[in-house]
Image: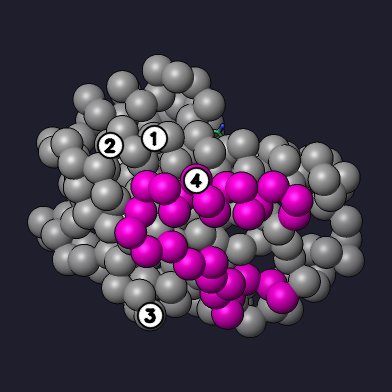
């Protein structure tokens, strides 16, 4: 993919981009997760996290800061993730739209997960409605995986794009989680259509 020069220039000047470089974080996205996790405390020390769409790994690094030595992050992406020098990270190359993915994820987990986080994004076409529909479809796949791998009272944090069918998706999350809110972290660019749905306390029991 060729990125426009102005976009690349603008990004390099940006506060969270420079902060991530300085703190050796693999992406500025790490701050989005850290900001929301700090506010709503949905990731606890020692937690088992499933991170969907995890490459290059900024959210993995953010999770490691919170879960500590007894926690585990299972990171899933279409792309290979550069290895981490930590026994608390496992990586899996898979497509979350593949119905078998949920079985592969379960095989990697020592017990049901405490939290599923998903920053999965489609390739952006620039056609607003198309990108929105694709994003919501990926968010649905993340919800499906969360329903299958989370423990009772587990949490879900998933990226969505604003648009026509967002309300339908939020309703689906509300059917499964006791408390649901839409959040826009400070580190998410104001002009970006992205928001995150935070579903806390999965109702179904395993
Ligand atoms: C915005 S990036 C994630 C950034 C990551 N949270 C971080 O902090 O480094 C979105 C990721 O979603 C992945 N992705 C897109 N479609 C996917 C799919 N169907 N299954 C798994 N991963 C997917 C992409 O490969 C990409 O790495």
8 sits left or right of 116 in the view: right
Q: Earlier in the sequence, mark 3 or mark 1?
A: 3
Say what secondary structure mark 4 lies in: helix
**Residue at the limit of the structure toward the top, as seen here:** 100
Measured Cα–Cα span from mark 3 to mark 1: 25 Å
Read off the magenta span.
163-190
Task: Give whichever of 51, 93 is nearer the camera.
Answer: 51
**Label 3 vs label 4: CA separation?**
24 Å
Q: Position of residue 102 (x, y in %)?
A: 36, 26
Q: Nearer the viewer, mark 4 or mark 1?
A: 4
Find residue 66 and report its horizontal and vertical position in percent: 26, 68
Residue 51 shown left or right of residue 11 in the figure: left
Kindly indicate the quadrant of the structure image that contains residue 1: top right
Give the residue pinned by disc 4: 172
Query: What residue is shown with label 2?
Result: 149
Q: Residues within 10 Å of mark 1 (few under 14, many from 20)?
A: many
Considering the numbered disc 1 on the image, is that residue within a helix, a strand or a loop? helix
Identify the residue at horizontal 81%, vertical 70% (top origin): 9
Name the residue that disc number 1 marks. 145
Of the image marks 3 and 4, the number of the one nearer the N terminus:
3
Query: Label 4 vs label 1: CA separation?
Result: 14 Å
Name the one closer to the observer, 15 or 191.
191
Mark 2 packing: few (<14 Cα in 10 Å), some, or many (20+)? many
Residue denoted by label 3: 39
Can residue 136 be spotted in the picture? yes
First in sequence: mark 2 vs mark 3: 3
């Amino acid at each position: 993919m060729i990125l426009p020069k102005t976009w690349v220039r603008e990004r390099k000047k940006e506060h969270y981009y420079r902060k991530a470089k300085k703190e050796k974080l693999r992406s500025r996205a790490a701050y989005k997760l850290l900001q929301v996790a700090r506010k709503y405390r949905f990731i606890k020390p020692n937690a088992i996290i499933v991170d969907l769409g995890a490459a290059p790994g900024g959210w993995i690094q953010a999770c490691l800061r919170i879960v500590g030595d007894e926690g585990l992050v299972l990171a899933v992406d279409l792309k290979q993730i550069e290895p981490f020098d930590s026994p608390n990270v496992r990586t899996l190359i898979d497509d979350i739209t593949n119905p078998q993915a949920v079985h592969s994820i379960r095989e990697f987990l020592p017990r049901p997960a405490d939290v599923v986080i998903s920053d999965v994004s489609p390739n952006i076409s620039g056609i607003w409605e198309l990108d929105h529909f694709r994003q919501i479809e990926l968010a649905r796949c993340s919800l499906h995986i969360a329903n299958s791998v989370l423990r009772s009272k587990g949490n879900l944090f998933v990226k969505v794009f604003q648009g026509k069918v967002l309300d339908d998706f939020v309703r689906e999350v509300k059917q499964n989680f006791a408390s649901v809110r839409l959040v826009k972290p400070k580190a998410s660019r104001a002009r970006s259509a992205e928001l995150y749905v935070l579903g806390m306390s999965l109702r179904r029991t395993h």
